[in-house]
Image (cartoon, helix red, strand yellow):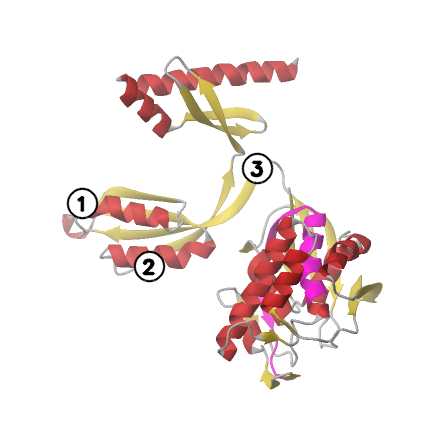
Amino acid sequence: MKAIYLDIFSGISGDMFLGALIDLGASVDTIKKALSSLKITFDIKVHKERRLVPGMNVEVLSYDKVGRKVSDIISLIEKSTLDDWIKKTSSEVFRRIGDIETKIHGNKNVQLHEIGMVDSIVDIVGVVTAIQQLDIGKIYSSPISLGRGFINSHHGKLAVPVPATIELVRGMPVYFTNTQNELVTPTGAGLLSVLVDEFTYPSFIVDKVGYGMGKRTLPQPNILRVIMGSYNTLEKDSIWEIVANIDDVNPEFHQYLIHRLLSQEALDATLTPTMMKKERLGIILTVLCANQHIDMVQDVIFQETSTLGIRMRKCDRVILPRETATVKTHHGTIRVKIGRWKGDVVTISPEYEDCKKIAEKKNVSLKQVYYDAQKEAEKFFDLFSKKKMA
C-alpha cells in the first residue's frame, strides 16, 4: 500500500501539489489526456527547477479567463470521460469551496472568480488524477503553515489568510508565521480538506520524495515537499482514547449511551466497573474514535452522562489484515471473520448474529453453533494453507 506525507513547511497551492506529484512520477501526458475531456482549452508546461533542491514548476496556460460557478464546473466534470473516483473527488473539492464562498458572500452558487478559472480547475482535477495514477491509498499531512499580510483579489484587498482559506482549514492543525505573503491558497486548502486522511506523522518506508515549486519569492524556500512511502501488510494508524469516570448515572441508561456512541462513528465503547472516591461504585467509560469524530463523541458523553470532564490521549494501533468468509455447518451457513499475522490465519471469529439466529431457529446451544462454525473454518483454512504450500 502506498501513502504520501505532505510536508507543508512553506504553504501549499494547487500547482505546487501537482508539481510534487509529477516529481514523484505522475505522467504529465496522462494527466493532459484525462483532462482533455473537460472541454476546456489549456496546456500544462512543466520544467525542472532547482532551489536548493530540484523540483517541478508547473504552469497552466489558457486564454480562457472566465470565472465559473460551482454548478458549471461540476457539470463540466460530470460530462467528461474521467474515472468515476476522479469525478466524485474533484467535484467534492469544488463543492467544499463553493459552500465556503456561499457562507462568506451570502448567496448560493456564487461565481468563483479565481478558483473558477481554467488554471484552478486543471490544478484540482490534475492533482486528483495524479493521485489515482500513482495508486496512493492514504494521504497524511503535517500542520499547515499560514502567512500574513494582504493581497489584492477580485473582491479587493484581503487579509492573509484570505477568508476562504481560513474557513477551509477550520478543524485542521495550523500555525501562523511572520511570512508577509499568502502561503496557502483556497485551491490548496480545498484539496487538503477533501484529500487528507489524517494530520499526523506517519510511519512507513520512504520510497521517493517529490518537490513542487511555488511562484512567489519568499524568505524561505517556496517549496512543497511530498514524501511517498510504502507499508507492509499490517495497517498502522492513530486513534483517540477518550475516558470518563461516572458514578451517578442510572444503569438503565448505559445501553442507550453505548448505542449513541457507536452510532456517532465511535470505533468501540466499553464500561468498566470501579470503586471511586468515598467508596462509591462507579464505571469508567472508555471510547475509541478517529480524529475526525472527536467532537461528536464528546457531544454524546456530555449530553448523556453526568461527567464534568474527560481525559484524552492519542494511541497508535496495529490492525491485522482481515477478511470475511462463509462456512457451511450442519446447522447452516455462517459468516466468519479471519485475521492474519504475517500471512498466517491467527484468529477465526464466527459472526455472533449468524450463530444466534441459527441457535434460536433450531433450538440448539449458541455455544455449540459457534464452536462448530469455528471448527469448519479451521479445517478450511488449514486445507487452504496446505494447498498453497504444495
- Disc 1 marks which residue? 252
Q: What x and y, as percent, mark residue 35?
A: 74, 58
Looking at the rendered image, the disc whose residue lies closer to the viewer, 3 or 2, is: 2
Instruction: Name the foreground residue: 318 vs 259.
Output: 259
C-alpha gap between disc 3 and disc 1: 39 Å
Q: Of marks 3 and 2, which one's residue comes earlier in the chain?
A: 3
Q: Amino acid at mark 2?
A: Asp
Mark closest to the chain's N terminus, 1 or 2: 1
Tell me which residue sits at (27%, 22%) in the image: 360
Question: What residue is at 62 percent from the left and 14 percent from the top?
Answer: 387
Front residue (pair 280, 26): 26
Q: Which amino acid, by three-letter code, is at mark 3?
A: Leu
Which residue type does callout 1 highlight? Glu
| Residue 38: percent from left, percent from top | 72, 60
What residue did someone put label 3 on? 234
Q: Which residue is mark 2?
A: 299
Above or below 245: residue 104: below
Does the image show residue 227? no
Query: Image quadrant of residue 335?
Result: top left
Give the vertical position of 269 relative to 362 (above or below): below
Give the quadrant of the N terminus: top right
Rate crowding at label 3 as few (under 14), some (14 to 19) or many (20 or more) other CA atoms within 10 Å.
some
Q: Is residue 141 magenta?
A: yes
Q: Residue at x 27, y 49 (%)?
A: 257
339 left or right, relative to 214:
left
Q: Foreground mark, 3 or 1?
A: 1
184 on left or right of 28: left
Q: Out of 85 and 254, give the one closest to the viewer.
A: 85
Q: Which residues are magenta?
A: 121-150
Q: Is residue 268 magenta?
A: no
- Can you give x and y, in whole percent of width and height, for residue 323 in the image? 52, 31
